[in-house]
C-alpha cells in the first residue's frame, strides 16, 4: 500500500512485521519509522520527498532486516539508525538533505552492519556509520562532505582557544593595614566607600573581589575573611597550609578566579592554590592543591593577579612583575621596571589587579594607584612609565593590596 502526506508514513512498533514492496512512501514527515525488533523492511523503492528522514530506526529498534530499499530526495537522512544490531543490505540513498545513511555511536547506535549500500549526491556524507560494522561494498560518490563513506569518524579538529585578556573591572577594594579598613574605588580613582574589618582580621595583607564579595587575607592567622560588599563579616576560612600540611609563614598576596584561590608566601618562596569552596566548608585546616616555586629575584611577592594562562606576582622590592604559568610549567618572565607617570621610581608597590589590557598597581610608599599597559610591561626590557595614577583617600595611607 501507499503512504502519502502523513506525519509518519508507516510506523512499525511491533515485532516480526514485514513491510515489502510499497509503491510509494512520500511527502510524509518521516517515511518509515521502525520502533520494534526483528522486523523486515524490503524492496520499498520509492521512499522519497519526506520532510525529515526517509527511514528512521529509533533507539528501541534492534535486530531489524533492512534491504533493497531506495530512500531518495528526503529533507533529512535517507536512512537514520539509532538502534542496535540492525542489518542494512543493498540499500540506496541519493540526493537527501543530510546524509545518505547515518548510524552514529555518539547517538547510541551500535553493532549495525552495512553491506552493498550506495549513496550519491547527498548534502552531507554518503554513509556516516561511526563505530558500526563495514561488511564491504559500501560506496559513496558525489556527496558534498568527505569522507564519502566513514565508519571511523575521528573527532573533528577543534582549533585551540586563545584566551583573551581578563574582563574589564569597574573598581577594586584596597585594604589598609594601619587603619584596619577596606577602601573601595572606581578605576578612575573615585572613592565609593569603606568599611572596618573584624577585630580578628587585624593583619590585612591583601584583598580580592569575587562574586560580589570582598575577601581579605590575614597574614598572621593564615586565613581569609569574607565580607559582603557593604562590610558585613560573613565567614572565616579554614587555616591554609602547604601541600604537605605544614604551616605557612606570612601569606601576603591573594587572587581569586572562579573556585581557585591563589596565595603567595615570600618566606616560603611559594605560590599556593586552594579551592574556594573547600576553604569555606567548615573549620579546620586545608592543604594547598598546588604550589609553584617563586624564582630568585621575586623575593617579596606582595600581590597576585590572574588571567586564563598566568599568575602575576608584583615584587615590592624590585618594582617588577613576575609572570608564572598557572600550571607551574616553564620559568617565570620578568616585566620592565615600573615607574610613575613622570618616570620617577616607585616606593613600595604592594597591590596588583588586571582589568582588560591594563594592570593597576598600588604603592603604599607613595599612597597612589598606578595604571600600566600589561602588554607594555612584558614587551622587552627597560623601564615603563605609568599611563595614569590617582592618590588614595585620606585615611588610606597604607594601601596593601588590590
Image: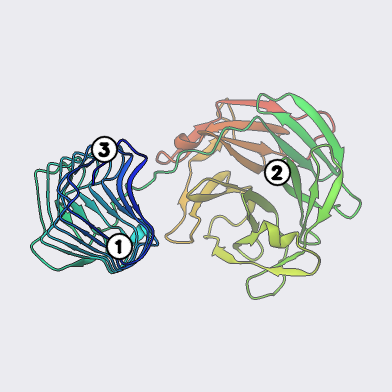
Disc number lying in front (2 or 1)? 1
Return the disc, 3 or 2, that comes first in the chain's sequence. 3
| Secondary structure under the numbered disc 2 in the rendered image | loop
Q: CA distance from mark 2 to mark 1?
A: 76 Å
Task: For marks 3 and 2, give the CA distance.
Answer: 62 Å
Left or right: 117 as drawn, with respect to 63: left
Q: Quadrant of residue 41?
A: bottom left
Please tell me which residue lies in front, 24 or 227.
24
Q: Residues within 10 Å of mark 2 (few under 14, many from 20)?
A: many
Residue found farthest to the front: 1
**Residue carrying label 1:** 17
Disc 3 residue crowd, few under 14, some 14–19, many 20+, Cα 10 Å: many
Q: Position of residue 379 (x, y in %)?
A: 41, 38
In the picture, the disc for residue 401 is 2
The image position of residue 402, as x and y in percent, is 68, 41
Q: For the point 62% across and 42% down, which residue is it?
A: 352
The image position of residue 21, as x and y in percent, is 17, 52
Amino acid at each position: 500500500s501507499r503512504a502519502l502526506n502523513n506525519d509518519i508514513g508507516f510506523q512499525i512498533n511491533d515485532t516480526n512485521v514485514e513491510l515489502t514492496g510499497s509503491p510509494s512512501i512520500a511527502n510524509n514527515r518521516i517515511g518509515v519509522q521502525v520502533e520494534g525488533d526483528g522486523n523486515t523492511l524490503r524492496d520499498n523503492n520509492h521512499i522519497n520527498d519526506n520532510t525529515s528522514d526517509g527511514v528512521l530506526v529509533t533507539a528501541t529498534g534492534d535486530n531489524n532486516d533492512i534491504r533493497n530499499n531506495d530512500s531518495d530526495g528526503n529533507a533529512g537522512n535517507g536512512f537514520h539508525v539509532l538502534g542496535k544490531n540492525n542489518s542494512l543490505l543493498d540499500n540506496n540513498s541519493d540526493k537527501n538533505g543530510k546524509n545518505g545513511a547515518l548510524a552514529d555511536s555518539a547517538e547510541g547506535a551500535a553493532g549495525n552492519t552495512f553491506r552493498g549500500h550506495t549513496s550519491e549526491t547527498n548534502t552531507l556524507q554518503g554513509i556516516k556509520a561511526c563505530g558500526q560494522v563495514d561488511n564491504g561494498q559500501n560506496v559513496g560518490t558525489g556527496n558534498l562532505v568527505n569522507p564519502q563513506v566513514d565508519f571511523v569518524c575521528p573527532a573533528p579538529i577543534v582549533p585551540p582557544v586563545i584566551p583573551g585578556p581578563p574582563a574589564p573591572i569597574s573598581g577594586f577594594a584596597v585594604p589598609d593595614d594601619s587603619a584596619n579598613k577596606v577602601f573601595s574605588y572606581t578605576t578612575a580613582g573615585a572613592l565609593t566607600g569603606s568599611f572596618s574589618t573584624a577585630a580578628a582580621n587585624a593583619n590585612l595583607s591583601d584583598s580580592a573581589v569575587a562574586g560580589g564579595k570582598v575577601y581579605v587575607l590575614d597574614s598572621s592567622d593564615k586565613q581569609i575573611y569574607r565580607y559582603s560588599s557593604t562590610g558585613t563579616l560573613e565567614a572565616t576560612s579554614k587555616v591554609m597550609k602547604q601541600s604537605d600540611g605544614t604551616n605557612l609563614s606570612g601569606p601576603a598576596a591573594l587572587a581569586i578566579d572562579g573556585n581557585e584561590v591563589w596565595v603567595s608566601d615570600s618566606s616560603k618562596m611559594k605560590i599556593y592554590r586552594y579551592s574556594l569552596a573547600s576553604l569555606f566548608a567548615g573549620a579546620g585546616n586545608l592543604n594547598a592543591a598546588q604550589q609553584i616555586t617563586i624564582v630568585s629575584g621575586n623575593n617579596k611577592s606582595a600581590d597576585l593577579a590572574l588571567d586564563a594562562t598566568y599568575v602575576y606576582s608584583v615584587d615590592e622590592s624590585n618594582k617588577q612583575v613576575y609572570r608564572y604559568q598557572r600550571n607551574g610549567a616553564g620559568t617565570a618572565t620578568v616585566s620592565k621596571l615600573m615607574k610613575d607617570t613622570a618616570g620617577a621610581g616607585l616606593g613600595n608597590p604592594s597591590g596588583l589587579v588586571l582589568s582588560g589590557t591594563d594592570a593597576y598597581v598600588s604603592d603604599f610608599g607613595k599612597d597612589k594607584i598606578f595604571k600600566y599597559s600589561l602588554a607594555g610591561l612584558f614587551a622587552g626590557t627597560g623601564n615603563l612609565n605609568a599611563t595614569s595614577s590617582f592618590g588614595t583617600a585620606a585615611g588610606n595611607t597604607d594601601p596593601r593590596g588590590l
